[in-house]
Amino acid sequence: MKKYFLLAAMAAVALVACKPANPDDEGDGPDDEKEYVQPIKIDGNFDDWSKLDASKVATAKCNPDAAKNALKIVKVYADEVYVFVYFEWDKEQTNPVPDVDHVPFHCYINGDGKADTGGYGDEFSDACSELMLEGFIYPDGTAVGSYEPGCHKWIGDTHGTGWTWEELGAVAGLCAGAGVPGKYEFYIARELYPLGKLADNFSIGFDIQLDWESVGVLPNAAVTDDNPGGLAPSLQITTVK
């Protein structure tokens, strides 16, 4: 009998020793989710862009034979929280005039990622943008400032042309930007996207203007007899998860 009790006691000790100290801490609960670390700090210092996986950054460069070439390069990196944008432009073509234009900068977004919705074929051959962001690189007409755009929804014909947008107003916190003359970065907060959920796969295009006339568009293409406007499809973006 003593032998039986001794074996039982030893088995109980072994079970206690093998049992995890915290049964709730097994590596698959919500406490183990990784804390979000913002990969790009919007501060006008662009060094952190070089630390990204280049294969996950969508890039458009100005075609040397494009008609509107003031935008030189644009890079877009999208994760599940933000869409980050970096771009460079020709300062000589966009010298701001105080109290006149403030250098408008537009983002044209195909947020659902579908080819059969949206429009604005004036600057992009796929003409599928549903949302346009309109803001200013020089908010006061003299100094580079934060990007705080108003939102506009496409209400024209599918794949249509013309400035056919319905003003939705500004969305507080949707964007923030910083930069220096000729270089800029900003983000779009996905949770504040005004047309609902931004798809994992979407597309985007950009223009920069002087006195409300586009002087740079990206993506773009060479001007040819078959493509006199030098239009290209919007830039395809895949969300990094």
Image (cartoon, grey):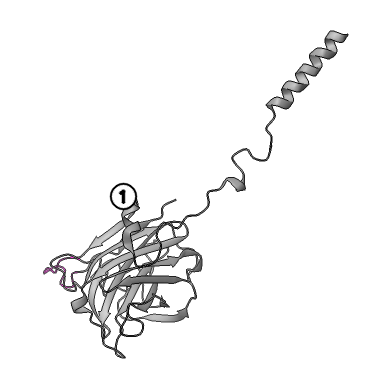
Q: Depth check: 174 or 112 in front?
A: 174
Numbered disc 1: secondary structure? helix
Badge 1: residue crowd in 10 Å (few <14, some 14–19, many ≥20):
few
Q: Which residue is mark 1?
A: 55
Residue 33, placed above or below residue 221: above
Residue 232, placed above or below residue 20: below
| Quarter of the rendering occupied by the N terminus | top right
Task: Please give the name of the residue rendered at 41% of the width and 52% of the height, measured from the top-left corner.
Answer: 240
The answer to whether residue 75 is seen in the rendering is yes
Q: Does the magenta stretch mainly form a helix, a strand or a loop?
A: loop
Residue reaching furthest left?
Answer: 225
Give percent across and percent down for residue 148: 42, 76
Give percent across and percent down for residue 10: 77, 17
Q: Is 27 included in the stretch rendered in magenta?
A: no
Task: Please give the name of the residue rendered at 35% of the width and 57% of the height, measured from the top-left corner.
Answer: 48
Give percent across and percent down for residue 25: 64, 40
Q: Is residue 115 left or right of residue 214?
A: right
